[in-house]
């Protein structure tokens, strides 16, 4: 990492530095969640990540904001939004405008509980500039049903409304759509949040159900699952009966989680709704005997999820070989259980869909991917040799970058392959890494000649392979800039087509004054 | 035979974490007919190992394993059948049917060892109660005193009084310094991130590239079950200090040259294989040389079927790397089980002294002559080594 200097000669160099810094940052923002990994602890991760954010935000502010348009994870997206809003003073009017649009689009993608948590963090930090308020107001008024939020994320909503100084009456008119709006109902959201007990009944069915659930068992089943759980415990409803009757109110993930916890089975329909990586995580969470028993169902679900993820790219990658890491370290950690292995498994099915001819090479020598299990050392070098022997058009390596049997062999094999055996680059090689290395401020690389990119969901593989060409250093910073602009444009278009009115938060605050 | 035969064991590529280097020892085929004592493995039908262990059972090696079983020294387990825990005093070979239960030292509950700490810290309460019934190590002091007293035995003339007190309190007031694995910096983390090979039957443990301990078992399943116990093992003070002051040791990265003569993928593969062979040779001749070179005195303890349990002592040559340990050989002399403890320099010197005393049957004048010194000097050395009390008793005895 360096710092941007002035002068025309330094410009190109600083451009290169910025490109490198951004790739480093994107790798981190995709993989790191500040949680414990196999080889580094949570505190280490957070420290390392905090430094990266600080560095990129201060030195390359517009690139920092542009990262919101990439496939970074929610944890880092929330961090970026928070930091951008906290440091509004350092941005130019033009930057503020772009940032506002990117923030609004990204917030719409984040799960609501994360957004409420972000708002609370802003409030705790005392960030209350006009732009922050506008961003929050826009997000709140765009919520499909604030009544639901009031019941489900009561504390979050309360804190946000207070922070924004929003007249709650204003919220009633728009989002509180359920049921006819008569004079009686104006202000009931405010009453619900701030003056509980003042109303004998609410017009909004959820708010009313919440009121009744305090003394009426029947009303419990009208509430969202997480809220109903608390009431069920209070009414001492037996768990089996509660689960049976609340099922229609559960979300997809809640159903899946409950089925796992109670040892029940997830049906084919639920499986078909899951994304590829989540499906892989689910399959790996099953005991191996059960995986064997449900082989057809699971394989079919994984295949169809992979086809969906591949989309029009299916079959476009030619002959593909993959080296997939199922060594002991692919277990991940207690908080990110089997994540690296799940990414490898999902990548296996995705590559199968993307390729015309596909050959996997698991480090353990595994031949039945559904039975994948984190065990043994990582003889990555030997497996890469095996994969290269297929003479593929493209070699994809999914690994945490630790190569220990023997150490460094993978790097040496790749280096000699590039310099001595395939200098013409007939085979494209890319290394995707699901694990953030806190010490290196990046994902671990295998060899300088092979581009490495971080990955969180296998579905992002095609987009990441695109980024990988920049990591290889053969395309310049100008191309990267153009690529980022394209991505941002696409990202914003997709969001703004759905929400055509530009809210206040998306404008720079200067214009509003 | 005065060396350790490692036929059938090959060193795998080392894995390095900080100052700790772990070299796996691999077997192509496990040693047939010898397993850990079944009570230690807890194979009573219920499988208490966690999900990871369970799936890692190496199916390919499931063969007849009735044969002979062994109980390593100072492992704690339930042998009595009534729930009472005992620690094995010295390694035993048995028939595997429980008829040859080892001599054991009862371990009272309040002296339960370090294992506890780990139990409470690990996932899930259900499993931890299981784990307490499984293997366990002795309290540090007891295990150490027992371990070393097997080697630094008292005089061969039996002293009821001395041997009773030595058994009860160790060679007190003199104590050997050793460190539990939990207090060796970085060892726990190194063992946790170590990726066990499917054929792995042992490990060589280095701190700051000095060989700290060797551990070999006959079967990969045994190794898998015991890998974590290296953490609760005892290590010499040298090991502790090396680990404490060591900087991260370098990994021996594979190097394949500049590729000038490389034409095909087969060339590349051959180069990779060559690099591995070179590494293995270097390892055996440089890193593990201190352990594998001869000069040991072996003492046969048990023989059963084809297996012989032996203890070995080094030559106690001051200034050289010296290990004590136990091993089981099969009928061809190959090592089936091995556990070593690296002595510190002070321990080597004490061993040297005790050795000389024992050779001369603890006769002060004769020992002094053998060491080429005076009786006064010998007495001073014995006292400073912490054997003063012993000497007083012995001296009066030898004059009557």
Image (cartoon, rainbow, N blue to C red):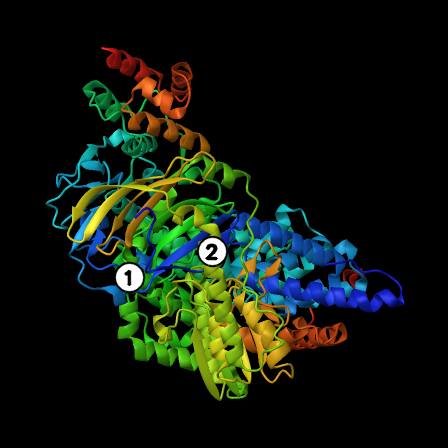
Whether residue A165 can be seen here: no
Position above or below: B176 against A193 = above
Q: Where is residue B389 in the image (x, y as percent from the top left)?
A: 32, 15
For the residue pair A220 and B267, the one nearer the viewer reads as B267
Marks 2/1: CA–CA distance:
29 Å
Question: Image quadrant of residue B148?
Answer: top left
Numbered disc 1: secondary structure = loop
| Mark 2 or 1: the one toward you | 2
The residue at which mark 1 appears reads as B57
First in sequence, mark 2 or 1: give its number.
1
Side of A337 where B171 appears, left or right: left
Q: Residue at x 47, y 51 (%)?
A: B287
Q: Where is residue B210 in the image (x, y as percent from the top left)?
A: 48, 45
**Of the numbered discs in the image, which one, if any, rests on residue B283?**
2
**Of the numbered discs in the image, which one, if any, rests on residue A44?**
none
Question: Image quadrant of residue A73?
Answer: bottom right
């Amino acid at each position: 990492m360096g710092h941007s200097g002035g002068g025309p000669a330094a410009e190109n160099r600083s451009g290169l530095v910025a490109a490198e810094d951004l790739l480093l940052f994107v790798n981190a923002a995709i993989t790191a969640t500040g949680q414990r990994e196999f080889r580094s602890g949570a505190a280490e991760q957070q420290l390392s990540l905090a430094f990266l954010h600080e560095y990129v935000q201060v030195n390359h502010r517009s690139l920092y904001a542009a990262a919101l348009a990439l496939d970074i994870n929610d944890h880092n997206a929330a961090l970026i939004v928070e930091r951008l809003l906290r440091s509004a003073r350092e941005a130019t009017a033009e930057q503020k405008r772009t940032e506002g649009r990117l923030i609004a689009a990204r917030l719409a993608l984040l799960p609501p509980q994360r957004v409420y948590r972000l708002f609370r963090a802003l409030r705790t930090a005392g960030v209350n500039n006009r732009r922050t308020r506008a961003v929050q107001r826009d997000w709140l008024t765009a919520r499909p049903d604030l009544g639901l939020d009031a019941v489900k994320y009561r504390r979050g909503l309360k804190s946000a409304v207070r922070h924004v100084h929003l007249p709650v009456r204003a919220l009633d008119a728009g989002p509180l759509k359920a049921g006819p709006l008569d004079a009686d109902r104006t202000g009931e959201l405010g009453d619900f949040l701030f003056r509980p007990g003042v109303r004998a009944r609410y017009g909004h069915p959820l708010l009313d159900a919440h009121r009744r659930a305090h003394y009426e068992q029947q009303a419990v089943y009208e509430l969202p699952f997480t809220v109903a759980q608390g009431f069920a415990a209070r009414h001492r409803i037996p768990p089996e009966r509660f689960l049976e009757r609340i099922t229609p109110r559960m979300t997809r993930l809640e159903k899946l989680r409950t089925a796992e916890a109670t040892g029940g089975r997830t049906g084919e329909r639920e499986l078909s709704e899951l994304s590829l990586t989540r499906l892989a995580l689910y399959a790996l969470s099953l005991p191996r005997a059960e995986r064997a028993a449900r082989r057809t169902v699971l394989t079919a679900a994984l295949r169809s999820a992979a086809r969906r993820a591949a989309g029009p790219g299916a079959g476009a990658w030619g002959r593909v070989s993959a080296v997939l890491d199922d060594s002991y370290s692919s277990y991940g950690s207690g908080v990110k259980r089997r994540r690296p292995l799940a990414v490898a498994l999902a990548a296996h099915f995705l590559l199968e869909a993307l390729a015309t001819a596909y050959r996997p090479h698991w480090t353990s020598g595994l031949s039945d991917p559904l039975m994948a299990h984190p065990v043994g050392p990582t003889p990555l070098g030997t497996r890469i040799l095996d994969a290269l022997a297929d003479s593929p058009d493209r070699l994809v390596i999914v690994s945490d970058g630790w190569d220990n049997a023997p150490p460094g062999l993978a790097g040496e094999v790749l280096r000699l392959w590039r310099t001595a055996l395939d200098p013409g680059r007939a085979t494209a090689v890319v290394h995707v890494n699901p694990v953030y290395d806190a010490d290196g401020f990046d994902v671990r690389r295998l060899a300088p000649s092979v581009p490495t990119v971080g990955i969180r969901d296998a579905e992002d593989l095609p987009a990441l392979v695109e980024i990988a060409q920049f990591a290889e250093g053969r395309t310049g910073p100008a191309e990267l800039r153009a690529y980022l602009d394209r991505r941002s444009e696409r990202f914003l278009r997709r969001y703004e087509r759905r929400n055509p009115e530009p809210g206040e938060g998306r404008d720079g605050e200067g214009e509003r004054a | 035979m005065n060396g350790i035969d490692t036929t059938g064991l090959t060193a795998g590529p080392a894995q390095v974490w900080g100052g700790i280097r772990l070299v796996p020892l691999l077997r192509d085929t496990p040693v047939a007919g010898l397993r850990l004592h079944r009570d230690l493995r807890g194979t009573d039908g219920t499988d208490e190992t966690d999900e990871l262990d369970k799936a890692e059972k190496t199916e390919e090696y499931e063969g007849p394993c009735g044969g002979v079983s062994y109980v390593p020294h100072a492992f704690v387990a339930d042998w009595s059948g009534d729930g009472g825990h005992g620690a094995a005093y010295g390694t035993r070979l048995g028939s595997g049917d429980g008829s040859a239960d080892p001599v054991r030292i009862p371990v009272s509950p309040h002296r339960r060892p370090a294992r506890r700490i780990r139990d409470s810290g690990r996932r899930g309460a259900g499993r931890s109660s299981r784990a307490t019934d499984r293997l366990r190590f002795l309290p540090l002091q007891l295990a150490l005193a027992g371990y070393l007293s097997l080697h630094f035995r008292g005089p061969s003339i039996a002293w009821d009084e001395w041997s009773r007190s030595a058994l009860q309190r160790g060679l007190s007031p003199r104590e050997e310094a050793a460190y539990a694995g939990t207090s060796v910096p970085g060892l726990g983390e190194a063992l946790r991130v170590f990726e066990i090979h499917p054929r792995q039957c042992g490990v060589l443990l280095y701190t700051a590239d000095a060989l700290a301990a060797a551990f070999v078992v006959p079967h990969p399943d045994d190794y898998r079950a015991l890998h974590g116990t290296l953490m609760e093992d005892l290590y010499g003070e040298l090991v502790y200090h090396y680990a404490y002051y060591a900087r991260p040791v370098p990994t021996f990265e594979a190097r394949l040259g500049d590729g000038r003569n490389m034409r095909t993928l087969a060339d590349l593969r051959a180069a990779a294989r060559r690099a591995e062979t070179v590494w293995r040779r270097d390892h055996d001749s440089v890193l593990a040389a201190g352990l594998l070179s001869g000069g040991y005195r072996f003492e046969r303890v048990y023989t059963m079927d084809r297996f012989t349990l032996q203890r070995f002592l080094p030559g106690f040559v001051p200034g050289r790397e010296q290990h004590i340990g136990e091993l089981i050989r099969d009928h061809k002399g190959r090592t089936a089980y091995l556990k070593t403890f690296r002595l510190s320099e002070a321990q080597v010197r004490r061993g040297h002294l005790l050795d000389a005393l024992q050779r001369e049957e603890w006769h002060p004048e004769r020992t002094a002559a053998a060491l080429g010194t005076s009786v006064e000097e010998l007495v001073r050395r014995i006292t400073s080594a912490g054997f003063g009390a012993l000497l007083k008793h012995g001296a009066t005895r030898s004059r009557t």
